[in-house]
Image (cartoon, helix red, strand yellow):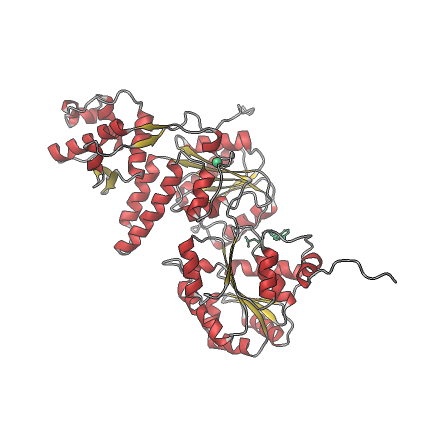
Amino acid sequence: APPQTRPETSDAVQVLNRVFGYDSFRGNQQEIIELVCAGGDALVLMPTGGGKSLCYQIPALVRDGVGVVISPLIALMQDQVDALRALGVRAGFLNSTQDPQARHEVESAFLAGELDLLYLAPERLRVPSTLRLLDRGTIALFAIDEAHCVAQWGHDFRPDYLALSELHERWPAVPRIALTATATEATHAEIATRLDLTGARHFVASFDRPNIQYRIAPKNEPRRQLLELIRTEHPGDAGIVYCLSRRSVEQTAEFLAAQGFTALPYHAGLDARTRATNQARFLREDGLIVVATIAFGMGIDKPDVRFVAHLDLPKSVEGYYQETGRAGRDGLPSTAWLAYGLADVVQQRKMIDDSDGDLAHRRRLSAHLDAMLALCETVQCRRVQLLAYFGQRGEPCGNCDTCLTPPESWDGTIAAQKVLSTVFRLDRERHQRFGAGQIIDILLGKHTAKVSQFDHDRLTVFGVGTELREGEWRGVIRQLLAQGLLAVEGTYQTLALTEASGDVLRSKRQVMLRRDPERPVKARSARSA
Ligand code: ADP
Ligand code: ZN
């Protein structure tokens, strides 16, 4: 007989083909899997939808014993286990939602060597009986999913995650793989130290999602803008609309429903059954829109979400990236659209001021917001800026709003001085503080009732700003807030100067501003009535 000419396929590739039915590995999956199969430790950074699960599922099948997966997503464990069982993988989970009978069955299967994968909630590992159980079986590997939980300040699971550093002491020979979708280089380093993974190899996948078109539009009438986006670009498509408050979730869902769309609300204030039903319908039905607070989406694997729309500003670039990342997991063109305006900046600055916690905590919140604002106000490619935030480099993409319709930047120093000196005069000469609306009325020289009431038409700055329209002044003030050249204070969200304002007023600092496009969404005219 002729010698075998077929190239040898590794165990890992065979499992990929036979169990999961996929032809080939993606990105650096193969390298990661081979390292862990050989007993090495790995720290894996891969964006949502990148294919992290196979990185521990396949080694768990290739190696002797049970792969122990630590995951905080308790609500998803049943689904994950069901999906694996459907593929013939012997999987089980242990968490607090289980009845004793079910727990007992999983434990027996584990001890009998009848499990390939065991999902554990992180707090289970602090229970001595769980540790004793694991001691009596063979462990193929530890996978630590959502590993950023160890680094995130104030995170619910943090204490449980910190305790995971002890895994290595107790089971020194068992390889560990930590996985996350969210990590800047700082978080990176923190995961490695906190989990005692300093010897692990790091695998950093590209965070670029080339099929997602990023767009950030000035917010005028957000619901009407959203409607236009859906009607002209995504009729009949599945999508997620994120809002900050439960109330606006409800209202937006009702609005879309009234326009004839199937739109379901999702937020933490709804009872568990409604939430579960709405989530299940979104996964199963075509062309459904979920309007949600950020409570929605963690771990959701729906490949054909065609658009993610934000009607309010996300609190951080991490959040924005994760939420928009739920679009286009199938690799097909998808839209990430965000409407952003002056009120967002005012509101979020105020929320930070009002938040509990120490100064350091508020500083961190502020830094997160500033990075998000910088992304909104950039005149560069959105993708380049987004990747840079995650410590990665990119080329202008040609598939974001700033690439497609490059915004002009203009020297806004004089406009800035007009705003700042109005705020200054009101404050210093009259000990008054006002919100953006009144400042703009003064600049435009409008004789409103409130202007007369406060004699603001006698100010020297009254009517000095007629070269810009009201919307443009709002854009100027929004950007001054974003750049830290103006601050928002107090219950009435009035404007105040900052330390940095002085340099602008004294012409020591130039202020470059972005000119908001007239019509940012190049909408084809809608056919509907
Ligand atoms: P993550 O956990 O990184 O968000 P998943 O592990 O859930 O991503 O994978 C996302 C999707 O991609 C899943 O539907 C998964 O089955 C699929 N997938 C992963 N790896 C491959 C591959 N090598 N070939 C084809 N599909 C893959
Ligand atoms: Zn671009």
Between 105 and 525, the one lying in front of the other is 525
Looking at the image, residue 84 lies above or below residue 26: below
| Camera-nearest residue between 528 and 143 | 143
Q: Is 77 positioned to the left or the right of 268 in the image? A: right
223 vs 130: above or below: above
Compared with 252, 517 (above or below) is above
Q: Position of residue 99 (x, y in %)?
A: 54, 69
Q: Residue at x 50, y 47 (%)?
A: 207
Q: Quadrant of the C terminus?
A: top right
User: As drawn, which residue projects farthest toward the left?
Assistant: 429
Q: Which percent across, then down, holds residue 209?
A: 53, 43
Residue 465 image offset from top left, x and y in percent: 25, 23
Horizontal placement of 393 versus 85: left or right?
left
Q: Residue 477, relative to residue 125: is it above or below?
A: above
**Which residue is nearer to you in this view: 417 or 158?**
417
Of the 4 image quadrants, the one containing the N terminus is bottom right
* Residue 85 visible to the viewer: yes
- Residue 493 in view here: no
Q: Which residue sits furthest right?
A: 1
Residue 393: x and y, percent? 47, 44
Q: Is residue 42 left or right of residue 435?
A: right
Report how many numbered discs are placed on residues in the image.
0
**Camera-nearest residue between 415 and 105:** 415
- Which residue does the image show at 44% across and 43% down from the upper left? 386
Q: Residue at (69%, 55%) from the top-left corner?
A: 21
Q: Quadrant of residue 320?
A: top left
